[in-house]
Image (spheres, rainbow, N blue to C red):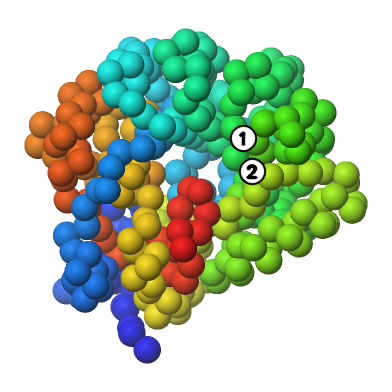
Amino acid sequence: MKSLKAQDHLLSSSEAEIKLLESDRSGFSGDRFAKELEKTDLFPLKPTRIEILQINLGKMCNQLCRHCHVDAGPDRKEIMGQATMQECLEVIKSHKIATIDLTGGAPEMNPYFRWFVEAIRAIDPEVTLIVRCNLTIILANPKYHDLPEFYRKHRIEIASSLPYFTAMKTDSQRGDGVFDKSIKALKLLNEQGYGIEGTGLVLNLVYNPSGAFMPAAQSGLEAEFKKRLTDKFGITFNSLFTITNLPISRFLEYLLRSNNYESYMEKLIDSFNPAAAKGVMCRNTISVGWDGYLYDCDFNQMLELKVNSKDSRHIRDWNERSLTEREIIVKNHCFGCTAGAGSSCGGTTT
């Protein structure tokens, strides 16, 4: 078994990572993942092309999920301003981006969310526009009740987290009552045509494990989710994406509190898959932080690891050639994206 001590993690500003380093500073080493890539001739890891612009509209959220790598919640004040959104729009105007992926927190809580969506659609009516909706936001406040109609009007693709098809597992991860609210929201989306064959309105669900284990096979879970949600609630959806929880932020804190960090990391390392490494999302994605800074992926963003590009570290300084030629920053948390069938915001990578 390939071992990794708890202190062999990357430096970060979160309380959990600080505690991790203080446990044994002398053992700190963050290059284990890079060494695995070297064995497969993938190091330094380089982009293939830039197809996806994933934009974090802020860390404010109506939920407080225990696995959240963004550490989002109702008390977070970091949100993207209209000026930074305008800088994103300039990039969308000037460069052919295949997919715009809006995330958070709850992206809909940004006061400029609807303006931003409408501005993107005005620039490119055909671009794939994804919103990562937590479902309960639709019911959180009357001002959000018309979101399903807004999504449909602008042909937004919905990606929504649903930890399981039962209340107990869902509520244990996301909070009391979340499952029932999620089911109501899914029914509202179905009423608008989302997830219904032939409408072209895409509704995908996202599954994260609730504990210190890797997700089961995506295809099998998708079939089970579809059967259970259809049989019991009459709900339909397009695809299920399985995402491995990465050892950062709240999930790392959970691993440390439960003494599962070392065993979980060993699972990820032992499951390293070179084929999955070739398809990691950082190779075709740029992640934009709420303040406009650029990152290789959403996870690196939360660890404040900005892109390795001297002249293009902020959206206002976008230089596609520099970003395409950069070396992607990798640390030990990247084992989460390369374990088994791989993991990305779009599910498995192999």
Residue at 37% x, 33% y is 53
Label 1: which secondary element: strand
| Residue furthest out toward the bottom | 1
Residue at 51% x, 49% y is 346
Residue at 19% x, 69% y is 41
- Give the x, y percent position of residue 247: 42, 61
Residue at 33% x, 45% y is 284
In the rendered image, which residue does mark 1 sit on?
158
- Give the x, y percent position of residue 38: 19, 71
- Give the x, y percent position of residue 92: 34, 21
- Up-down relation of residue 12 to residue 190 (above or below): below
Name the one closer to the observer, 266 or 221.
221
In the rendered image, which residue does mark 2 sit on?
204
Give the CA separation, mark 1 to mark 2.
Answer: 6 Å
Cβ–Cβ under 8 Å for marks 1 and 2: yes
Name the one closer to the observer, 326 or 123.
123
Horizontal side of 331 relative to 171 (left or right) equals left
Residue 147 shows in the view: no
User: Which quarter of the image is occupied by the N terminus?
Assistant: bottom left
Name the one closer to the observer, 316 or 119.
119
Label 2: which secondary element: strand
Q: Tell me if mark 1 has few (under 14), some (14-19) or many (20+) residues whose alpha carbon lies within 10 angstroms of its own.
A: many
Residue 241: mark: none
| Residue furthest out toward the front | 198
Residue type highlighted by circle 2: Asn
Residue type highlighted by circle 1: Ile
Name the one closer to the observer, 139 or 92.
92
Residue 183 shows in the view: yes
